[in-house]
Image: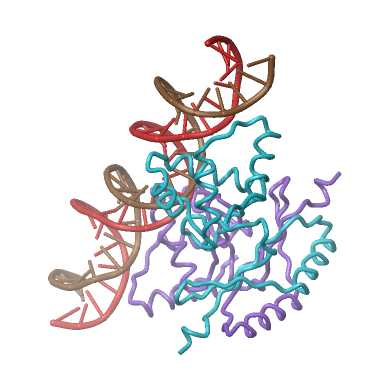
Chain colours: A purple, B cyan, C brown, D red
DNA sequence: TGTGATAATGATAACCATTTTCATTACTGT
DNA sequence: ACAGTAATGAAAATGGTTATCATTATCACA
């Protein structure tokens, strides 16, 4: 539970950009890494407050943006609600399968779909840099 | 340029739901159908104002929601900006290939990807109802 | 080790797209 | 024509997120 690698990624990024270290960022990083849930800024905010009640929500937003910039996390926009953030380091690329009834979602990946996307983009003259695939349906549990 | 079919779809929907007809909705529908662009509510608002300067932005929002409910349009969330709306009636299903440099996008579709999604969802116990696939890259023009 | 330059913070105001409220107006079936 | 109710427009409210700004913390270097 030390997350040395992630810390190093952040530290290196901070150093390279000429930014400065801060204890708040470390608190936020730890809270973020300790859960595998896809949190919103608000949710992470209330988690971090348990350790550091003085922290401000603006710092959480700023820090989450920083995490995305240094490749530790990724924004997840599933609908019109608040943006969620998911871990990126040490996690395979994946897409999402969302249940329209209970709102739950699972992570999935299909190498063939990935490959076909690449092919499709190339056909259109695009150099593919990423994609977002969200599938919506009714999950097993909700069908019963 | 009469869009009788689309008008009928809306009229039927309105009738079935016990709603009432309104001239504003018709103005908004016409403005919406007359462009193939993917407009935001604000953009459509300024288009409609040319015909009917008295119209309110709230009505545009309400009406766009109605269009989505009756299957005439679909929300398009490409990023953090305002939601865009695209025609649904008379338009094949398609996904989007967005250029990260110029912001332009094209519509694409790959039946095999569609099929693989279906298969993937089924494997996870989901009944697929829809999906959203956005691919990001650099377009031909921007590479030069 | 102190110091100056500057990044980070927290509180709060501002922002912006969207939704709600509410009084008024317009449809619609009878 | 009338009653019932949906639709409208203006404005306020909402909610997530970002900007502002005075203060505090960090860091390279003297």
Q: In the rendering, at what x and y percent does residue A65 appear? A: 45, 64
Give the vertical position of B13 relative to B116 (above or below): above
The quadrant the N terminus of chain A occupies is bottom right
| Residue drawn at (58%, 85%) of the image | A125
Give the vertical position of C25 relative to B120 (above or below): above
Q: In the rendering, at what x and y percent does residue A126 appear? A: 57, 82
Q: Pick whichever, A56 or B37, lies toward us.
A: B37
Rendering quarter of residue B91: bottom right
The quadrant the C terminus of chain A occupies is top right
Q: Is residue A34 left or right of residue A25?
A: right
Give the vertical position of B107 relative to A42 (above or below): below
Q: Pick whichever, A37 or C22, lies toward us.
A: C22
| Residue drawn at (81%, 56%) of the image | B126
Q: Pick whichever, B55 or A20, lies toward us.
A: B55
| Residue drawn at (67%, 80%) of the image | A120
| Residue drawn at (59%, 70%) of the image | A88
Q: Is residue A71 left or right of residue C30?
A: left
Q: In the rendering, at what x and y percent does residue A28 appear? A: 47, 59
């Amino acid at each position: 539970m030390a997350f040395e690698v992630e810390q190093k990624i952040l530290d290196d990024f901070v150093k390279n950009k000429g930014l400065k270290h801060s204890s708040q960022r470390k608190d936020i990083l730890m809270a973020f890494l300790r859960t595998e849930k896809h949190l919103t800024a608000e949710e992470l905010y209330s988690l971090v407050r348990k350790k550091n009640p003085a922290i401000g929500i603006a710092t959480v937003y700023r820090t989450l943006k920083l995490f995305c910039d240094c490749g530790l996390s990724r924004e997840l926009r599933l609908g019109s609600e608040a943006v969620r953030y998911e871990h990126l380091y040490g996690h395979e690329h994946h897409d999402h399968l969302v249940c329209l009834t209970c709102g739950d979602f699972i992570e999935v990946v299909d190498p063939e779909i990935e490959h076909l996307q690449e092919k499709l983009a190339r056909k259109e003259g695009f150099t593919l840099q990423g994609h977002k695939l969200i599938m919506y349906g009714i999950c097993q549990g909700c069908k019963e």
